[in-house]
Each structure stands twice: as structure tokens, then as C-alpha cells.
Amino acid sequence: MASASVVELTDANFDQEVMKSSTPVLVDFWAPWCQPCLRLGPTIDAIAEQYKDKVKVGKLNIDEHSAAAMTYRVQSIPTVLLFKDGAVQKQYVGLVAKAEIEKTIDAMLGNG
């Protein structure tokens, strides 16, 4: 992980880290062989740093932990899901601009 603010998500900790989180959670579903995923990685890391006291950011490697990906019907990667109170609020599939994610997070936090 490039950022200390990013949580490594697994099938085992997904429920605790995401579903039971008291703060909004951004989840990046990715795989190490996925070039667009690798290009999105620095954006996810930057968001994790920028919102570290307000939003939990996690990455889930779908090759190692497929149950959560199947639960949320992740069919293409990268897929980024934003959760609040255990429910998906927003989904992005493919490369997404940092400004677009920021806009959604700010609206979720009541800043925009």
C-alpha cells in the first residue's frame, strides 16, 4: 500500500471495516494485473490522505478476496463503491477523475 491511510480489505474484515463503519467508506475493488487499477491507485491514495479524518478508504484485491466483489456484483475493475451506514451510495466503474470522487464525498459529508 502506498498510503498508510488506506485499509487493506479482505473478505474476513469487510463487514467490520465497511458495513459497521461509523464513517463513510470508499472501497476500491482492484487486481494487481489490471492496468487501469494501477493508474487509479495514486488517486485513491491521495483521497485517503485528503479525507483521512472523515472517510475510511480501503482497497480490496478481488483475486485474493472475491466474496465481497461477488456480493456487490463487481464485474469490471477498477470499481469504486462509496458506502455510508452500510449501504452503497455511489458506484464508479473504470478510471474516474479525482475531482469526481471528491465531489461525491463532499456532498456525502454535507460540504457540497
Image (tube, rainbow, N blue to C red):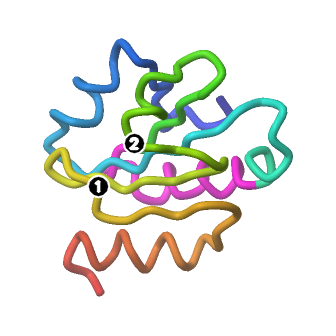
What amino acid is found at the position of numbered circle 1 in the picture? Answer: Val
- Start and end of the magenta stretch? 40-56
Spot occupied by residue 58 in the image (x, y as percentages of width and height): 46, 37
Instruction: Determine whether label 2 and label 1 are within 8 Å by CB.
Output: yes
| Farthest bottom residue in view | 112
What amino acid is found at the position of numbered circle 2 in the picture? Answer: Tyr
Which residue is at 33% across, 52% downward? 55
Spot occupied by residue 15 in the image (x, y as percentages of width and height): 25, 25
Indicate which label's residue lies in the foreground, 2 or 1. 2
Assign the magenta stretch its main secondary structure. helix
Spot occupied by residue 89 in the image (x, y as percentages of width and height): 28, 63
Q: Which mark is residue 88?
A: 1
Q: Residues within 10 Å of mark 1 (few under 14, many from 20)?
A: some
Which residue is at 21% across, 36% downward? 19
Which residue carries the number 2 mark? 72
Q: Nearer the viewer, residue 104 or 76?
A: 76
Q: Mark 2 or 1 closer to N-term?
A: 2
Q: Residues within 10 Å of mark 2 (few under 14, many from 20)?
A: few
